[in-house]
Image (spheres, grey):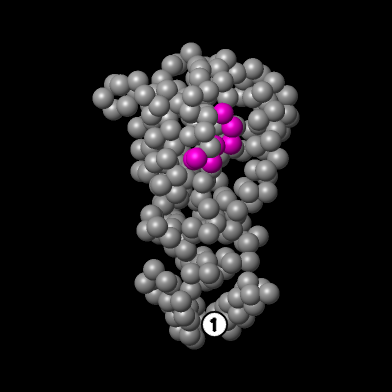
Amino acid sequence: MYLIALCDDEKAELGKTEKMLSDYEKKRCGMGFIIRHFENADDLLYAVAEENYMPDLIFMDIYLPDNKGNWVSFGIEAAKELRNMGYKGKLVFLTTSKEYALEAFDVDALQYLIKPVSENKLFSMLDKFLENAEEERKKYILLRIDGRFARVALNDVVYCEAQGKTQCLYLVNGTQCLLRMTMAEIYELLSPYQEFVRLGVAYIVNLGYIDSLNSQEVHMNNGKKIYLPRGAYKRLREQYFSYYCRETE
């Protein structure tokens, strides 16, 4: 499943792009897209900043109105802001002019497509994107947060804490994500990666963010202190040193 954002002030263009994406899904059996529309760049920037929305791929028109209603190459400015916010996904610009092609690549755009975009060109671009994304996406997990799907980088997860019927995922930037999942379900997603270990029934921690540990407690680098269940220290110590030995090989 891939998250795709479409940002264009013209609803007809949004519809055309979504139709081609739907056709691509049908021709590539088993491929799944979750598509979200944005009619201006401000709404997209808000979703990324406030909702932790991290689409795998963004299609963005270069000619968008700014917050004063002036028609400018606001898509380029929005892309720069996305990069400054830490967005590392792929950007594809859709436009009627080649005027800003060089600027598009300054923000590491995957491609610059001239409207009207042909199905062949779009499909070729998607083939290229998916070929590389299959490896990259192994570094992320897809979670449903506050009713929306969000892509979370594994390296951003510091630890997860049980909080009654919901669990709280603590990220390296200080964000706290409440998940309506069981700890068992979350651990099933994280357990294939050696850096994640479970401490009793209440915690899953990222070994990479442990500052220190002793027989009674673990100190995370964000200041969190986690008390160890009885008998957990020996195994945790082995996992911790095994992880760091592999990291330095």
Where in the figure is residue 183, as x and y percent of width and height?
52, 58
> What's under tag 1, amino acid-wise?
Tyr
Q: Residue furthest left?
A: 68
Instruction: Determine whether 188 is above or below 92 in the image.
Output: below
Residue at the image position 64 percent from the left and 17 percent from the top: 118
**What is the quadrant of residue 67 in the picture?**
top left
Residue 44, percent across and down?
Answer: 40, 34
User: Residue 33: where, in percent of width, then height?
Assistant: 60, 32
Q: Residues within 10 Å of mark 1 (few under 14, many from 20)?
A: some
Q: In the displayed structure, does residue 234 sit left or right of residue 39?
A: right
Q: Which residues are magenta?
A: 106-112
Whether residue 7 sits left or right of residue 240 in the image: it is left
Q: Nearer the viewer, residue 230 or 78?
A: 78
Q: Is residue 15 above or below residue 106?
A: above
Quarter location, residue 121:
top right
Residue annotated with mark 1:
233
Which residue sits at x=55%, y=17%?
A: 115
Q: How many marks?
A: 1
Residue 235 in view (yes/no): no
Nearest the eye: 6 or 161? 6
Is 152 magenta? The answer is no
Q: Quadrant of residue 40?
A: top left
Residue in the foreground of this view, choosing between 16 and 79? 79
Q: Residue at x 44, y 49 (%)?
A: 86
- Residue 57 in percent (x, y) is at 55, 36
Up-down relation of residue 159 to residue 1 (above or below): below
Residue under the image location 66 percent in, 31 percent down: 126
Q: Residue furthest bottom?
A: 215
